[in-house]
Image (spheres, rainbow, N blue to C red):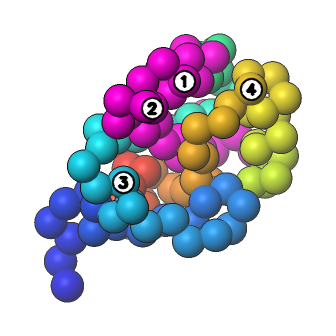
């Protein structure tokens, strides 16, 4: 079956559980690629604030970490989750690390 909408896709959450984007139907999704050791990493703070300010109005921020941006997210999912929570208080949904380029690019995390 061909995916026709973002809501048709599935991913694994950062803790390894299935995440069906269909559960977010009717909401506005902001899907972002992230890298924990990037110069833009402080943007986690702004993304978290967006999530807190607008989630009750239907905004869902979803982070997809990837190590494909200059090797700037080398940790495993547990390390990434811990870093994001401890340093930036991230509580928005984070998915497991994905590839975003080439033939193995995850459809939800590709740019």
**Image point (54%, 24%), residue name:** 52
**Which residue range is magenta in the image?**
45-74
Whole-number angstrom distance, CA of label 3 to CA of label 2: 11 Å
Question: Closest to the observer: 46 or 59?
Answer: 59
**Circle 2 residue:** 55
Magenta-colored stretch includes residue 39 = no
- Labelled pair 2, 1 in contact (Cβ < 8 Å): yes
Which numbered mark, 4 or 3, is in the foreground of this view?
A: 3
Judging from the image, what secondary structure is the residue with disc 3 in? helix
Judging from the image, what secondary structure is the residue with disc 2 in? helix
Quadrant containing the N terminus is bottom left
Q: From this viewpoint, is residue 45 visible?
A: yes
Which numbered mark, 4 or 1, is in the foreground of this view?
A: 1
Query: Label 4: few (<14), some or many (≥20) within 10 Å?
Result: some
Relative horizontal placement of residue 29, taking residue 87 as reference (left or right): left
Whole-number angstrom distance, CA of label 4 to CA of label 3: 22 Å
Query: Label 3: few (<14), some or many (≥20) within 10 Å?
Result: some
Mark toward the start of the polypeptide (4 vs 3): 3
Q: Is residue 26 above or below residue 105?
A: above
Mark toward the start of the polypeptide (4 vs 2): 2
Q: From this viewpoint, is residue 30 visible?
A: no
**Circle 3 residue:** 24
Query: Label 1: few (<14), some or many (≥20) within 10 Å?
Result: some
**Circle 1 residue:** 52
Residue 71 drawn at (x, y percent):
67, 39
Whole-number angstrom distance, CA of label 2 to CA of label 1: 6 Å
**Circle 4 residue:** 89
């Amino acid at each position: 079956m061909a995916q026709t909408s973002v809501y048709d896709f599935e991913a694994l959450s950062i803790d390894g559980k299935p995440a069906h984007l269909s559960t977010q139907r009717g909401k506005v999704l902001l899907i972002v690629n992230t890298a924990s050791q990037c110069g833009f990493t402080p943007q986690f703070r702004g993304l978290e604030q967006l999530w807190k300010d607008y989630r009750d109005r239907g905004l869902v921020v979803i982070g997809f970490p990837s190590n494909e941006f200059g090797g700037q997210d080398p940790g495993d999912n547990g390390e990434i989750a811990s870093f994001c929570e401890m340093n930036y208080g991230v509580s928005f949904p984070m998915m497991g690390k994905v590839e975003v380029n080439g033939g193995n690019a995850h459809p939800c995390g590709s740019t």
